[in-house]
């Protein structure tokens, strides 16, 4: 049973393999040369404007914690504000240390706030939707719980998908 073809058939097969390889190399060169001109542009970032953050004290035992809330004033472009489940925050201390990285916001539930039951109180981030929808709208808020006075002037970076949409600083706690 073996090969029943002639020497000419073998040469034709070799020629076809070399020709296909050459065509593939030309194709790769064309993609490399012209690819950047035909790339699909990224979606422009959505920008949020936020009110000045508000601070509320919360005491757990002898310790005092700060809860910071920043309300959404507006979203641009209108009609495409993003979704809360796609929203994440990163908090960077004034000295450059990352405090919280790429944290997904959870729906606000005060009964779920870390109250030190398991010893330490951890920083957590929440979203407050006025109408309980997943779409971000003016009047909705971001709430960060479990901060201390050491976190003053930390930067909060808000991302929707991979886009930076807003930033704010944690203000100094009120005196008194």
Image (tube, grey):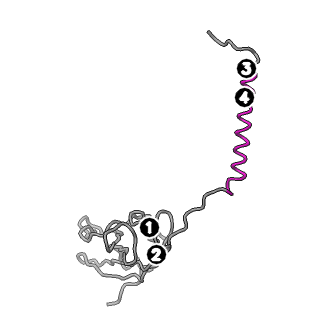
Image coordinates for residue 136, horizontal then vertical, percent: 40, 71
Q: Can you tell which quarter of the image residue 135 is in?
A: bottom left
Chain-order first, disc 3 or disc 2? 3
Would you place residue 55 above or below residue 3 in this image? Answer: below
CA separation in Å, label 3 and label 2:
67 Å
**Label 4's element?**
helix
Q: The C terminus lies in which quarter of the figure? A: bottom left
Q: Are marks 3 and 1 in contact (CB under 8 Å)?
A: no
Q: Is residue 18 magenta?
A: yes
**Residue positioned 71% across, 35% down in the render:** 21
Picture quadrant of residue 175: bottom left
- Magenta stretch, main secondary structure, is helix
Q: Which mark, residue 82?
A: 1
Residue on which disc 2 sits: 75
Label 2 SS: strand
User: Do the residues bearing badges 1 and 2 touch, measured as CB atoms within 8 Å?
Assistant: yes
Q: Which residue in the protein does label 3 denote?
A: 10
Q: Is residue 176 magenta?
A: no
Residue 112: percent from left, percent from top: 26, 67
| Residue at numbered disc 4 | 16
């Amino acid at each position: 049973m073996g090969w029943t073809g002639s020497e000419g058939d073998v040469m034709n097969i070799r020629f076809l393999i070399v020709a296909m390889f050459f065509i593939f190399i030309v194709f790769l060169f064309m993609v490399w040369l012209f690819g950047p001109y035909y790339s699909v542009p990224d979606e422009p970032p959505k920008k949020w404007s936020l009110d000045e953050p508000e601070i509320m004290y919360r005491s757990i035992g002898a310790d005092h914690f700060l809860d910071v809330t920043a309300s959404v004033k507006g979203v641009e472009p209108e009609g495409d504000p993003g979704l809360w489940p796609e929203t994440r925050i990163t908090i960077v201390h004034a000295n450059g240390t990352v405090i919280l990285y790429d944290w997904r916001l959870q729906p606000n539930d005060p009964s779920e706030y870390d109250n030190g039951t398991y010893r330490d109180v951890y920083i957590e981030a929440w979203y407050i939707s006025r109408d309980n929808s997943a779409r971000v709208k003016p009047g909705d808020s971001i709430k960060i719980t479990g901060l201390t006075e050491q976190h003053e002037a930390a930067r909060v970076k808000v991302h929707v998908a991979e886009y930076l949409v807003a930033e704010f600083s944690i203000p100094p706690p009120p005196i008194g």
